[in-house]
Image (spheres, rainbow, N blue to C red):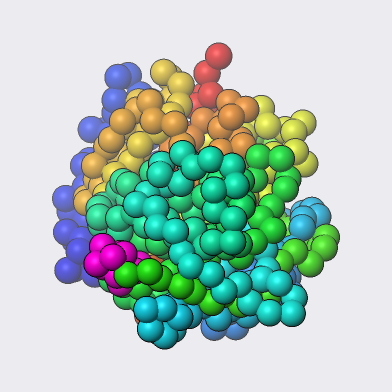
């Protein structure tokens, strides 16, 4: 741990200096938060949790039997770690399954490509495959400009650029458009299939899967396949050389009916204001091609471990701390939406919310979107965790994490501990999302920051919501 953290905490500010704009932590609050940081940095609990999840449960496709085993695992973990209340809140959802895939370039010569069906993809004809010439599109804008019917009997291929690695993951949103909306324009054009450059920053032949978008509940009738960056580069070079390119695609992906998913909810009940909730969490489901260690086993482990360390204190904080292991995030934030609906009558009691869902690298920044009264309190929390290498960022930054969006839209205040995402999109949604990518010391730094943040928010009587 000394390699990433300046220890042994003598660099912490004294309790008397932990005040911002008239707000000050009490010496007891500051000392407890600092002790939690020390304990978390020396603890392997976070790593043990993500190791258990990825090993005992494995990949956890939303709506699958494996995701259900993940909920059972979450319940057993919550009971083992001493949470006061452990429950599963179920909801129904449509289940999409990947099936089998063969994708081969057949002209100008035969070469197998590495591809992954995108969530919501249709299947190839039941008695065969799609065999057709590709029509090359340099980017998603070129595809959206086509006329209806212009792709009859063809396979559309949307190129683009591999994402540039960055600490913040900048570039994901624009690049993701080809994955999300490309199928709608390919079908409008009459294409037999759509192939896109996968959305990621790596140079390996491991394509990135992910969910497509639907505006009206309708999904693709054609195969929609993401291919790896090196394979996309190869097709671009052939196209630029003037070669005609043909493909064969055989896919059995499709929808399999309604199933039950659910959110696992773990509560530490507040000693004075149990109705007031500080909510943290991560999403329990993952894509099925890796073991979901980085996305988002790490987030489940970080937030659960942080709360579990707080549970070991002599008394509970004033407010309730709630850890939610959200179900079915990858397929459209279904668990997050279900939680917001099922808890509609207590949304006003959610005093603060945040999620860990950007990997397992070190946290470098704290941002917030809270009331004017609450901002100095977050600043003081920032002082406590600053020696972990975390700077205080913006104080009017919407967010909190993907699964927090439905709560934030209803006025729940949010904070976010931003992680270093420089390699996140190398691993995101690929078979390479496995436990070996997680550094235990970096994970412990995350747990330490969350433990201090969550304890201080729950022990405080500050109004983060405001008017």
Dominant SS in magenta: helix
- Is 143 positioned to the left or the right of 385 in the image? right
**Is 21 above or below relative to 139?**
above
Query: How many discs appear?
Result: 0
User: The N terminus is located in which quarter?
Assistant: bottom left
Q: Quadrant of residue 121?
A: bottom right
User: The C terminus is located in which quarter?
Assistant: top right
**Is 464 above or below relative to 431?**
above
Q: Residue at x 75, y 64 (%)?
A: 255
Taking the view exactly as shown, the residue that stands out farthest to the top is 467
Q: Of residues 376 and 51, which is closer to you in this image?
A: 51
Inspect the magenta stretch and tell me whether residue 241 lies in it: yes
Q: Of residues 318 and 234, which is closer to you in this image?
A: 234
Q: Of residues 97 and 35, which is closer to you in this image?
A: 97
Residue 331 percent location from the top left of the image:
62, 55
Q: Of residues 163 and 168, which is closer to you in this image?
A: 163
Residue 233 percent location from the top left of the image:
29, 67
Q: Which residues are magenta?
A: 232-242
Q: Residue at x 38, y 83 (%)?
A: 109
- Is 340 positioned to the left or the right of 419 in the image? right
Residue 347 percent location from the top left of the image:
68, 32
Q: Residue at x 49, y 58 (%)?
A: 156
Query: Could you tell me if residue 319 is visible in this image?
Result: no
Query: Could you tell me if residue 109 is visible in this image?
Result: yes
Inspect the magenta stretch and tell me whether residue 207 lies in it: no
Residue 88 percent location from the top left of the image:
76, 59
Q: Residue at x 26, y 62 (%)?
A: 240
């Amino acid at each position: 741990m000394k390699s990433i953290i300046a220890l042994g905490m003598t660099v912490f500010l004294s309790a008397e200096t932990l005040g911002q704009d008239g707000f000050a932590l009490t010496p007891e609050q500051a000392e407890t938060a600092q002790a939690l940081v020390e304990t978390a940095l020396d603890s392997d609990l976070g790593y043990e949790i993500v190791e258990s999840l990825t090993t005992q449960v494995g990949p956890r496709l939303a709506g699958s039997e494996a995701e259900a085993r993940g909920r059972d695992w979450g319940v057993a973990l919550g009971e083992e770690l001493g949470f006061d209340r452990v429950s599963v809140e179920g909801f129904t959802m449509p289940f999409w399954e990947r099936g089998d895939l063969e994708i081969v370039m057949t002209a100008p010569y035969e070469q197998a490509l590495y591809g992954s069906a995108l969530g919501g993809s249709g299947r190839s004809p039941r008695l065969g495959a799609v065999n057709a010439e590709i029509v090359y599109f340099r980017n998603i804008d070129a595809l959206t400009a086509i006329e209806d019917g212009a792709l009859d009997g063809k396979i559309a291929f949307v190129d683009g650029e591999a994402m540039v690695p960055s600490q913040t993951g900048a570039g994901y949103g624009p690049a993701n458009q080809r994955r999300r909306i490309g199928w709608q324009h390919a079908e409008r054009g009459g294409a037999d299939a759509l192939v896109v450059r996968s959305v990621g920053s790596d140079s390996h032949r491991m394509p990135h899967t992910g969910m497509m978008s639907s505006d009206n509940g309708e999904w693709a009738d054609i195969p929609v396949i993401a291919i790896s960056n090196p394979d996309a580069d190869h097709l671009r070079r052939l196209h630029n050389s003037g070669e005609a390119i043909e493909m064969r695609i055989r896919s059995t992906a499709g929808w399999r009916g309604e199933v039950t998913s659910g959110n696992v909810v773990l509560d530490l009940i507040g000693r004075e204001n149990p109705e007031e909730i500080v909510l943290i969490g991560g999403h329990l489901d993952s894509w099925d091609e890796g073991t979901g260690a980085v996305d988002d086993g790490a987030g489940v482990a970080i937030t659960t471990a942080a709360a579990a360390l707080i549970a070991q204190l002599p008394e509970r904080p004033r407010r309730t701390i709630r850890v939610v292991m959200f179900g079915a995030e990858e397929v459209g934030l279904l668990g997050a939406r279900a939680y917001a609906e099922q808890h509609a009558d207590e949304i006003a009691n959610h005093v603060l919310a945040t999620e860990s869902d950007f990997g397992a690298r070190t946290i470098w920044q704290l941002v917030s979107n809270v009331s004017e009264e609450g901002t100095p309190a977050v600043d003081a929390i920032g002082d406590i965790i600053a020696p972990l290498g975390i700077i205080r960022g913006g104080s009017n930054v919407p967010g909190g994490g993907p699964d927090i969006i439905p709560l934030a839209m209803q006025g729940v205040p949010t904070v976010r501990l931003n992680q270093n995402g420089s390699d996140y999109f190398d691993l995101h949604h690929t078979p390479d999302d496995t436990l070996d990518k997680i550094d235990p010391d970096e994970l412990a730094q995350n747990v330490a920051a969350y433990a201090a943040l969550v304890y201080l928010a729950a022990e405080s009587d500050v109004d983060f919501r405001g008017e």
